[in-house]
Structures are given as C-alpha cells and as structure tokens.
Amino acid sequence: MEPTPSRRRPGAARIAAGLLTLLSAAVTACSEPAPASSLPLTQIQDITLPGAASRLDYQAIDSGAKRLYIAHLGDGTIHVVDLDNGTVAGTVPGTPSVHGVTLVADRHILLAAVSGTNQVAVIDTNTLTVSARVPAGTTPDGIAYDPVHGKAYVSNEHDHAETVIDLSTTTAKAPVEIGGEAGNSVYDPASRTILVNVQDRNELVTIDPANDTVTGRIPVPDCASNHGLYVDGESKLAFIACEDSAKLLVLDLQTKQVTARFDTGEGPDVLAFDQGLHRLYVASESGVVSVFDEQNRTLTPKASGKLADNAHTVAVDQATHRVYFPLEDIDGHPVLRIMDAKQ
C-alpha cells in the first residue's frame, strides 16, 4: 500500500493541479475537516512500531496466522504485528523504499515491492527472511496475486508495464505493456482477471493472466491520476481513487460506466473494504478518512474526518472488522492505530 507524494515526483499536470487548488483556496474559504470522532470507529490500541517517524505504506493481513505486515517505506523494513497479542513479532530488513506488500498465504510467502532496488522481495513468512529477489521494472509499487495461475503482477509506475512473476519458479516472465503509468493492480476473483489503473491516461485496463495480454481498456473520465483501486467482484464494481482531484469513483464493470463520484480528503490513496459490513474506507495523504457504505450496487457516504497527519494507508480484518492505520509520527514515533468499526 511514491506519492501519493513519495511514489512520484510532481509532473506538470500535478503542479498545475496544485496551483489550481491554491487559487481556489484563495478565492473560497475552506472549512476544516471534521475530527476523527466523527468516524464510525472506536480507537482501541496504539502499538508503537520500530524505526524512525517516517513514511509507512501498504499493509497485508494474514487472517489465518493473525498477523499484519506493514511496509515501513522510510526505514526500508517490513514490520510484522501479532494481532492476537498486540505486539510487534518481528521486522524484516533489507527492503529499501518498500511500497506494496501482498500475502501469498498458500505458498507461505509475502511479496514486497522494493523500489530502492527495483526488485520484488520474496519473504518466507515462517522465518521472516528474504528467500529470493526478482528483478522488476522502474519503481515497483502495487502487487496483485492470481492464485489460479500462481502468478504475481507488479505495477511499475515508470516503465508503463506490469512485471509478471511465476511463483512456482520465482522468476520474471515477459512484462505486460499497458501503455502508461501504472497505478494500483488488483486481482478480480469473479472475472479471474488482473485490473490495473493507468493513471496518466484515465484508464482501467484488464489483463488475462492465462496469456498475459491486455484484453480491455475502460475509460475513467474526470479523474486526475487514478491510483487507488479496490474491486468488489461479487457486486462487479470497481472503486477508484483520483489522487490529484480528491475524488472517489464507482465504476460498473458490467456496463463499463462510471455511475457515481464522491469527494474525499486531499490525495486519496489506499482503499480497504469490509466485506461483511459492506463498508469502504478511503485513506488520504491529508489524513482525512472517508467512509462509505455499499448498497444497491453503489456507495452512500457515511462519514469523513481527519484521523492524523499522513493517514494514507488502511487495512481491514474481515473476521473482526477491526481497521488498521499505520501513522508515521505520533509524539515522535511511528504507531499502528487499531480501531473497531461501529455498526
């Protein structure tokens, strides 16, 4: 789970968007975001994490082992939290500028996108050691896992391609050209395809993992930098975060049309979905968390509030409905904030 600021350096479009935002703010008075107390969440614990008060990124939950893996981008490490005991069970070093982390539970490995070396680190979840390193493209970020074909798909933001990794041999196959800057990648279990945001072309592309070819391009209009992505395969919907325009889009994967748009905090990044509660969480660089309920194949805004500075990453435990926010600087230390969802 670059910018989101540490992901990419601002280009002309990003700078222009920022200037427009500043001009708008100068003309129109902006209200302060609602406080965290407005969110349908109850704080139950803060766990102090090792390392410096620096940027944290994506997370991966292992529900079976009751572990949470957190990418500490600023430290080049991955923290492993024991969710039963509420303690840090270990830290994996040697992952400079780590971004995406994806669990492959059936193979007992964790995949980590290490942009500091343009590799994907394969981590043994039993020993918490790096067992292999696979070359990726420039600035690997998000990772999608296809359990049917036993392959991983890695978003290379600056190569306009997806790295494809055969996990049976831990080797890279021929990359899939997507024609633009790769945002997040996800696996859709309903269609058994890989979906990738092409964030500089306002497109969502589909890849068939059977032959690693692009099989479709869906326009995502009026969305500046479509980066964050979650797919609800059961409802055949995609939720897309527009990083530079602070919007969330609902895309109907059947009709291939955008059916709704909502405001979010500035710089929406990571999305997490509670399947039992049918609830979507959108975390943003501004620290504002937006919460939506899914019903009748669309979203309804439920609440929005500022949780903490740079609260841009979120994860949900499907079994307990607990919500996890790694926060880079609380009283000089990085912490994992654990919250319970309110009905």
Image: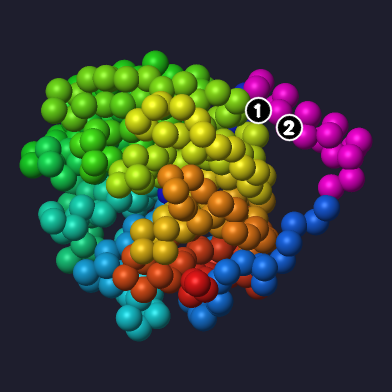
* 198 vs 321, nearest the viewer: 321
Task: Answer left or right for 27 relative to 189.
Answer: right
Q: Nearer the viewer, residue 122 or 225?
A: 225
The residue under the point 65% across, 44% down is 263
Residue most extreme to the left:
168
Please tell me whether residue 71 is drawn above or below residue 99 in the rendered image.
Answer: below
Badge 1: few (under 14), some or many (20 or more) residues near its Cα, within 10 Å? some
Q: Residue at x 23, y 43 (%)?
A: 189
At x 39%, y 27%, the residue is: 255
Specify the label residue 14 is tagged with.
1
Q: Which residue is mark 2?
A: 18
| Residue in the picture at 60% in, 53% down | 301
Q: Is residue 2 above or below residue 58?
A: above
Callout 2, which amino acid?
Gly
| Mark 2 element type | helix
Question: By what rule are the colours in the image chosen?
Answer: rainbow
Instruction: State left or right for residue 325 relative to residue 331.
Output: left
Outermost residue on the front side: it is 296
Per the rendered image, the range of residues in magenta is 12-30
Q: Are marks 1 and 2 in contact (CB under 8 Å)?
A: yes
What amino acid is labelled 1 in the image?
Arg
Is residue 27 inside the magenta stretch? Answer: yes
Q: Against 252, is 86 above or below? A: below
Secondary structure beneath dot 1 equals helix
Q: Is there any visible trace of residue 6 in the rendered image?
A: no
> In which quadrant of the rendered view does residue 152 lie?
top left
Q: Is residue 150 visible?
A: yes
Residue 127 in picture, x, y percent from top left: 19, 65
Magenta stretch, main secondary structure, is helix
